[in-house]
Image (cartoon, rainbow, N blue to C red):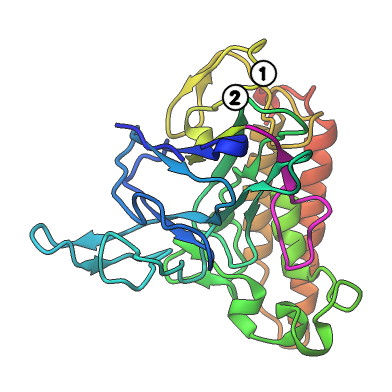
Amino acid sequence: MAVSLFSGISGATFTLINRCDYIVWPGIQANAGSTRLASTGFELPPGGSKSFQAPPGWSGRLWGRTGCSFGMNTSEGSCATGDCGSNQVECNGAGATPPATLAEFTIGSGTDSHIQDFYDVSLVDGYNLPMIVEAIGGSGNCSSTGCVTDLNRMCPNELRVGDGGACKSACEAFGSPEYCCSGAYGSPSTCRPSVYSEIFKSACPRSYSYAYDDATSTFTCSGADYTITFCPLLTSQKSSRDSSLPMTTGTPDGSGSGSQESSWLPNSVTGNSWKIASHFAMQFTLIVSTIPHNPLIQQSTFDGMRVVIQKSIYVCLMSCSDISASKV
């Protein structure tokens, strides 16, 4: 089963693919002034895909809902994460309830001589599942972007939702202006990365981690179609823009055959380095989580330790690709 959205001056085709080992219910919301697409929400089983056409000038966001329960006859119900509050499979113009990983698009923006698409994957409203966006065809930078790390497994306790099915942003968790980039902090010069946004950024360097994270998080392409993949590492999917490396097939534990370079991670990351970093991430997280609570130690101290750990993992991603996974 497949879903797509038009390209360039004719729009773009969006194809949503579910590589998770569970059902995902994508939601689609058009921004004000944009045409509603053929569907605003649907069920996407494991291995399924679906495509939609988006007209020129369309802008909006797409996300995955998880843990949904809808009636067989009425299609009424709700989702554990990413719920749009419509009480139906279709979101009918409503957006995702945070926390949710968001893919955001503006199709065919600019003058006639320089029309291009803008796209990003945002964690500003938190995180609920891994996602990547890949440009198919087109010209320009057209980089892949997204977050393939399972942030739910390394989410700080104060941001964790319920049993760990999602991870809130600091803005959603605390509501303070310095985290929400509001009030006196409502400009790029006054709203700076926080301890929590740094955790997100270290784990997912191409995703928006806070409101003014534009420089490293917004991407452009002209005349492309787009693939949005949920849980991409379950198949170790390689960007279709690089046909020199073979596609791989994998299992839910991340194993697979073939070789590939994760284009949504820094370009120097190759081989087993992401597996090694994931291993260290879990070990470091376990170490921090087992430190006994001491009321004399400020929470910010623990938060700082988390950032140091995350940055160490990122350094490993950049430098330890020669380490054999057998040594882990």
| Mark 2 vs 1: CB contact within 8 A | yes
Secondary structure character of the magenta stretch overall: loop
User: Does 40 appear above or below 172?
Assistant: above
Q: Residue at x 77, y 61 (%)?
A: 198
Q: Position of residue 141 (x, y in %)?
A: 77, 33
Element at label 1: loop
Q: Amino acid at mark 1?
A: Asp
Q: Quadrant of residue 65?
A: bottom left
Instruction: Give the residue drawn at x 63%, y 13%.
Output: 243
Check residue 238 in the rendering and tell me which mark sits there, or answer none: 2
Q: Observer-nearest residue: 236 or 117?
A: 117
Is residue 43 shown left or right of residue 33? left
Compared across the picture, whether 161 is left or right of 187 comes to left
Residue bearing mark 1? 242
Q: Quadrant of the N terminus?
A: top left
* Distance in Å between CA atoms under marks 2 and 1: 8 Å
Report if residue 264 lies within the magenta region. no
* 2 vs 1, front mark: 1
Q: Which residues are magenta?
A: 205-223
- In which quadrant of the rendered view does residue 115 lie? top right
The local secondary structure at tag 2 comes to loop
Q: Amino acid at mark 2?
A: Lys
Total numbered labels placed on residues in the image: 2
Residue 123 in sight: yes
Residue with the most extreme right position: 189
The reply to whether the magenta stretch includes residue 207 is yes
Q: Which mark is residue 224?
A: none
Q: Determine the residue positioned at 73% across, 24% down.
A: 270
